[in-house]
Image: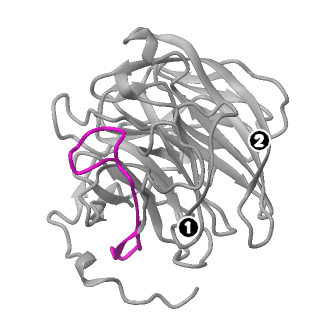
Amino acid sequence: MAQRPPRPARFALTALAGAALALTAAAAPAAARAHGAALPAGGTITPIASTVPANGDVNPYGMAVVPASTGALYQGDVLISNFNAASNLQGTGTTIVQVSPGGQVSTFAQIDAAHLPGACPGGIGLTTGLVALRSGWVIVGSLPTSDGTAATAKAGCLLVLDSHGTVRETLSGYGVNGPWDMTALDFGSFADLFVTNVLNGTVAANGATVNAGTVLRLGLSIPYDQAPQLVADTVIGSGFGEHTDPAALVVGPTGVGLGADGTLYVADSVGNRIAAISNASSRATSAGTGRTVTSGGALNTPLGLAVAPGGDILTVNAGNGFLVATTPYGTQAQSVQLDSSGSPAGAGALFGLAPVSNGDVYFVDDATNTLNLLH
């Protein structure tokens, strides 16, 4: 790894109060726990850092662990996108912060809607859709508003940033319409992006549920030392429920994670289930809303989703602040409450999460604007 230069003094952090918060795992059969090794046995939460940068952006949404050191990116650091500006209006956040495992924080990017290299309908409001590729490119979704309400939400785009945080291109159209979350299959010189979209007829429905949410696969060619080029676009999932919501802006298909067998798992928030789209990287047609892996039970409006190293599916609930581990066979093996603040307890606090190879799980907490570690 390249040697890390000193961080600017204004981003120096002290240890946060309550550095270790104990939590209790929900009861689960011993056999289920033996398989569901996705959640750490210690069950301890340690706050790593505040996610609020110098400009005051709040509402941390997306997360990506940097896979390789290049430019201003350091392997093992966590990138976090902010959805709200300091005004706390949704769909107005413009920053991506970079946090080291030790709690050093810097602003990786502050994006100016007035100085973009291409179209991004509506401007900038960074979503949970955030990936970091081995080639050093960082891609983030934008679902912007002008006043924090769904009535002004626009289609947005995907923003492609280089390893120094400069936006080099935008990807709009091709079915990108309110990109809400994203994951990637990264081959180095080529990558598939899997993007959920939540604005297909949603605003016009004025709060009613419409079954028009989509999952796109966007193929990128990544030439050496050049910006990625979009070479293919395919709708691989469609018909997901979506609706506007005063508290969440939009509720629709959110988190996505790719299993080792090529199955794409989708957090179907409106359906309160985890869906599976088979052959996600090769299929040429839509799988509709996919196969239901699990529904109900410990799920309570699942939002963020990631696949743990062992293959279990991790989701975080918008309704009650719980993290749920589900086997690929549909058994809800474990659950732990990561946030119990507010009323109802934990509601609206959890978005992005990222499991790491040692079994720990990074997650962002919107209620405290922090990056945390479950270990």
Q: Nearer the viewer, mark 1 or mark 2?
A: 1
Residue 302, by quadrant, is top left
Residue farthest along the front direction in this orientation:
114
Q: Residue at x 35, y 32 (%)?
A: 318
Residue 223, by quadrant, is bottom right
Q: Residue at x 76, y 54 (%)?
A: 229
Return the residue at label 2.
Answer: 262
Indicate which disc, 1 or 2, sits on the residue closer to the N terminus.
1
Q: Is residue 72 above or below residue 307?
A: below
Magenta residues span 84-107
The mark found on residue 335 in the picture is: none
Q: Position of residue 163 (x, y in %)?
A: 58, 71
> For this view, does 113 lie left or right of residue 31?
left
Q: Residue at x 66, y 41 (%)?
A: 194
Q: Position of residue 254 (x, y in %)?
A: 51, 33
> For this view, does 260 lie left or right of residue 344?
right
Quarter of the image for the C terminus: give it. Answer: bottom left
Does the magenta portion include 90? yes
Give the residue type at disc 1.
Val
57 or 307, nearer to the observer: 57
Q: Residue at x 57, y 79 (%)?
A: 71
Return the residue at label 1.
Answer: 66
Q: Position of residue 190 (x, y in %)?
A: 80, 57
Q: Is residue 357 above or below residue 194?
A: below
Distance from label 1 to label 2 (Cα)?
22 Å
State the predominant SS element of the stretch in magenta: loop
